[in-house]
Amino acid sequence: MAASCMHIGRYIRRNERFLRLQFEQFLSIRSFALTPAVHQAAQVHQEAAESVVIPMKKTWSKEAVLQALASTVSRDPTVCAYRFQDDSFLSPRNFSEAKTYSYSLESGRAAAKYIINNNPNLFTKDFAEPHIPCLMPEKVSPLLEEVSEAALKERINLRKVTAAVDMYDQLLQAGSVVSMDTTHDLLDLLCLYGDSDPVQESGPQQEDTEESEQELWSETGFKKPSWRKTNNAERIFNLLPDRDTRCYSALIRGMVKHGASKKAFDMYSELLNNRLTGDVHMFNALISAVPDVRENPDEKWELVSELLKQMNQMSIRPNLLTFNSLFKTLKRCGKLSTIYAPLALNEMKALGIAPSLATYNHLLHMNVHGFLKIQVLRNLLLELEGCSFTCRDPGDNLFFGTAMKACLINNDLELGYKVHSLLEVGENWRLLGAANKQAYYYNCFLRLLCQMENIDVVLKWYKKLVPSMFYPHPENMMGMLQTLDTENRLDLLPMIWKDMKTFGHIYPDLVEELLSLMARDKHNPKVQESFAACALDVKQTFSEKGIEWKSSYLSHVSTVLLRANQCEEAWEMLLIFKEKNLVPSEAVLNSFLSECQSSIGPDRAVELVQLSAAFCLPATSELASRVLVDFNLTESQRTILSQLQTAEKMSD
Amino acid sequence: MASLTSKMFPSVGRINIGRLGLKSPSRVTYVTNLSSNVSSERKGVPDGKGRGSSDKKPPRKSGEPRTEKMSVDQDWTAVYPAAAPFKGNAVPLPVRMGLPVNRGIPPRKEGNLELIKIPNFLHLTPPAIEKHCEALKPFCTKWPSALDTDEKCDQLFPIKVESTDYVSAGPSVRNPAARVVHLRVKVSSLNLDDHARKKLLKLVGERYCKDTDILTIKTDSCPLRLQNYDYAMYLLTVLYQESWKIEAWEAEKTRADMEEYSWEDSPSQKNLLDTLLHAKVAGDGDEQEVREQLLGRKEVQEFKESVTRLKNEGDNESSLQQYKEAVQKVLHL
């Protein structure tokens, strides 16, 4: 991925030295020398034996040098996204933090923009040379106040929906005629914003920022205003003496966008009754609205084919968006999609429209069997290898996620690598979409790697991608744990725990898996030490976050601590057992005795047996006998123990 | 009164001591102790608000610096691709900087303002410079192979124009100092005869450096560099043309205007000839003929050379020596 940071350097002094030709004195008296910056032709100066050939000066664009220098830097895998402060305290550590910081950044920016735009008299001096337009105050409120068409145009340009409608009504009342172009623009404005003001109108900018940030982070889109029954757009439309294609088109598209698909089709039939032609945007909207008005797949297809026929009759040429909306509707048509999708693709090729990523995405979503899907994807990638894409359809950003998910489901590692290499071509990373889509893609990729690759490759990718590209989901952590288990690299468990803590993935099953893996086998002392430190860290995190202990956790932690000869901490664990009313297993108590034989005193041992008696464990008697044998006890202790021993024997 | 003042002093002293006591620890540790000070102050506030410190979340701890994750063979040009301030968590070196206080050691790199203030060249390590040079090679053209020595360059391209570009971090890219143009040319490479050379040197005055024989024209009167460059070239042309012209009033050049000393018709010549005539060295005849005859003599020529040299070069060992010898010869001492 190209470097995300391109700074202009600080204080650099660069001396240029032009070498220049001598005067030709014997030619003409008033000869002026030639300027090298302008002169392009090669100059040959005949002198003694050799001729000096000066090569042609190369020219380049303004950014070429910067781009060349930028091509020397690559991505740093340890750093978080550029917009965050690069500091160990201030950078975000998990997904929610990153989201919050991003929102706060945007909110600050929007607040500054709001202040600048609403107080332009305070920001009149322009320091920037050359001029930077986006830093100066923008015109936010309309200047013209009188009732005129120019004022209406101004309000349309500033996107003031209610003000524009008011101005239009005033113009009509005054009796002046509004030109057709302006009416078209007004209708377009109304249909785009669904007859309510865009959110910039409202005072504080929070909604706007959240909206734009939500677009960045989740892309679920804000809740679009729905098409009201008493609508200004419809009213104005009905008031128009003559309505042409553009008016109908604007209204139909607005209705489809804001959910009134039925009305859109009514409007369309009205258009047909008036024997007007449509345009390509209108048909795009109608085709994408078909699933809302028909339930049955067959009916859907019937309506779609009818629309296409009419489009043909009106000799309107379809474009990429037409086909994409066609595919989108076909997705909802069930089995018919397998029949008609290839036909539609051929049509596209015949018309010379190159499919975009959204097309491929829809194709992958068609109702095909998993195996076929992979075939489709494989052929697709063969064709697309090395291509760089631009965004031609709003749905382009879904392709990579779908492709990687398909690879994951079918466990096809090679294909996954191919998809990833396609992503790294040129600027294709921009087509990954919002942060959550990016995270989805990388999650699938990492899970695929965890399942199929060996540990070194997995670790390499893990280090490369986390946390600079995305914050992994809990499934990834589970996948990592399982991979470590299968590849027998359990010494990396503390690293995984550290990451789990940073990302906030402290879920019961994850912790269970982690602790059981740690406690399962005995390892060499160094690894055991690290495990013990990790277990203590787990304990501390539990107490900090107030997570409920389970007996399995406690037993695992105790086992790990005992193996590392940390008897004090292990004793504390047993106390926690008692505190939380959880029952330790016999194995724990036995191992406790055997490991800590040298270090604990007899008092401790007796307490241990008493503890086990309190829990009513059947192993109490054995424990008691062991303690009697192995330790030097005082008389009172002996009696206690023998009591316990007999008590147990009696209860058996 | 007295009692009041006596009460004042101990309290003042106590306050001072108290302040001194608090000051020293906070000076050495820069930022880290601030949170603990703040929390201790909060505990001092009476708990009437009903919020104890135990209900609050524990203060956010600093994460580990990302130097921990860096591998030994990482690409450093990716970490510091361009000029950036010193970031303690990105530079994996155990650097310390600052004044050691109280027999301590210089402070750590985390949050160290001294390290942030100074300019650093972490973005220009030798591998980075190599990469930059490789990337910039396509913009360059090959040096003409015929121009392999400096002398050839000077011979073929005697005029050298110099200008400076300035880049700084700020809202404006313009710098008024960038309009200055220096034009340098060796006067010996111009086609001038004696009169033209002298006239040129008189015209340019201070811009000529005698030791290196370089004429420097510095132009900064126009607002743009191109304008200044054109003006400098124009000035050079005009100087050349004008120095070749001979104006009518140049004939009125007096001895005071001469650049160098010439012995003919000077007081020295007059004095010498008068001296020699009085000494009756030459034969009799017409005074004018005798003078000319004297002038033709070898000693007189030597004397002329030595005086000329002394006047032009100034007093140094060899010229004075030469003068002495010449005088001795002429006056037959």
Image (cartoon, helix red, strand yellow):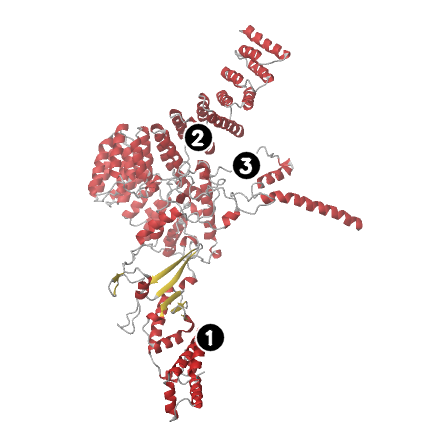
Residue mark closest to the camera, 3 vs 2: 2
Q: Toward the viewer: B249 or A175?
A: B249
Front one among A283 and A84: A84
Report the disc number at residue B59. Answer: 3
Is the residue at mark 3 from the same chain as the one at mark 1?
yes
Q: Residue B114: horizontal and vertical position, in percent?
A: 52, 48
Q: Say whether disc 3 or disc 1 marks the residue closer to the N-terminus.
A: 3
CA distance for labels 3 and 2: 24 Å
- Picture coordinates of residue A510 (x, y %)? 44, 26
Q: Position of residue A233 (x, y in %)?
A: 35, 46
Three-letter amino acid code at the position of disc 2:
Ile
Q: Is the residue marked by circle 1 packed among few (<14), some (14-19), or many (20+) residues within 10 Å?
A: few
- In the rendered image, the quadrant that contains the N terminus of chain A is top left
Q: Residue at x 43, y 83 (%)?
A: B332
Chain bearing mark 3 = B
Residue at (27%, 47%) from the top-left corner?
Answer: A245
Looking at the image, which is closer to me, B75 or A409?
B75
Q: Residues within 10 Å of mark 3 (few under 14, many from 20)?
A: few
Q: Amino acid at mark 3?
A: Pro
Q: Is residue B258 left or right of residue A608?
A: left
**Vertically, is A254 above or below A598?**
below
Q: Quadrant of residue A277?
A: top left
Q: Is residue A416 left or right of residue B120?
A: left
Q: In which quarter of the view is residue B169 placed? A: bottom left
Q: What label sits on residue B315 in the rendered view?
A: 1
